[in-house]
């Protein structure tokens, strides 16, 4: 004689899969190709605690060439994630710093780095198993 508290079954439509040919998806893919590459991730992480000079970044990021660091910084600047400030000194001083947009990206980048670190043992084990299966 009361109201039933049993949930009713409700069919919800399945979420639409993204269409890789849609303009929004192409735009997102373009952004992710920039922010998801190895060197951009390192640069964003190194700049997350404040501005750095070019050679500071080069010393901090093991294995990056001068050309690759230049291209990475230019790409990040073009996308509005990094600012480049030139100080009129002799020799000229150039600082790179995350913009508000770039600082907003640093948290997800750090979370991705933490995830990779937390799961490194599992990933290395999976790689070893894969390599063993495929080396036969």
Image (cartoon, rainbow, N blue to C red):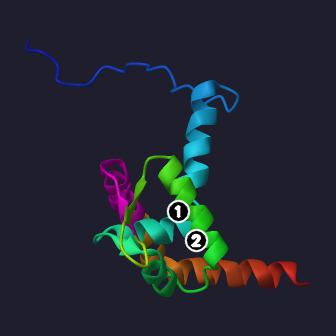
Q: Label 1 neighbourhood size at 10 Å, few (<14), some (14-19), many (20+)?
A: many
Name the residue furthest front: 90
Q: Residue 100: percent from the left, percent from the top?
A: 30, 50
Judge from the rendering whether residue 121 lies leftward or rightward of residue 94; answer left or right.
right
The residue where tag 1 is placed is 73
Query: Does 29 appear above or below 38?
Result: above
Name the residue furthest left: 2
Image point (57%, 28%), residue name? 24
The residue where tag 2 is placed is 69
Q: Label 2 neighbourhood size at 10 Å, few (<14), some (14-19), many (20+)?
A: some
Label 2, secondary structure: give it.
Answer: helix
Judge from the rendering whether residue 7 lies leftward or rightward of residue 76; answer left or right.
left
* Number of numbered markers: 2
Proximity of marks 2 and 1: CB atoms separated by less than 8 Å: yes
When asked about the image quadrant of residue 98, the answer is bottom left
Image point (91%, 84%), residue name? 136
- Report if residue 44 lies within the magenta region: no
Image point (52%, 48%), residue name? 78
Q: Say if residue 45 shows up in the picture.
A: yes
As drawn, the label of residue 98 is none
When asked about the image quadrant of residue 84, the answer is bottom left
Q: Range of the magenta residues?
A: 94-110
When asked about the image quadrant of residue 18, the answer is top right
Q: Residue 101: percent from the left, percent from the top?
A: 35, 48
């Amino acid at each position: 004689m009361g109201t039933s508290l049993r949930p009713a079954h409700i069919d919800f439509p399945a979420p639409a899969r993204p269409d890789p040919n849609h303009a929004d998806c192409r735009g997102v893919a373009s952004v992710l190709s920039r922010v998801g590459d190895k060197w951009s991730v390192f640069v964003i992480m190194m700049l997350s605690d404040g501005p750095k000079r070019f050679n500071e970044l080069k010393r901090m990021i093991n294995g990056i060439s001068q050309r690759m660091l230049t291209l990475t910084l230019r790409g990040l600047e073009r996308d509005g994630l990094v600012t480049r400030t030139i100080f009129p000194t002799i020799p000229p001083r150039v600082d790179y710093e995350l913009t508000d947009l770039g600082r907003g990206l640093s948290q997800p980048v750090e979370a991705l780095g933490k995830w990779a670190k937390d799961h490194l043992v599992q990933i290395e084990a999976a790689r070893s198993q894969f390599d063993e299966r495929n080396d036969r």
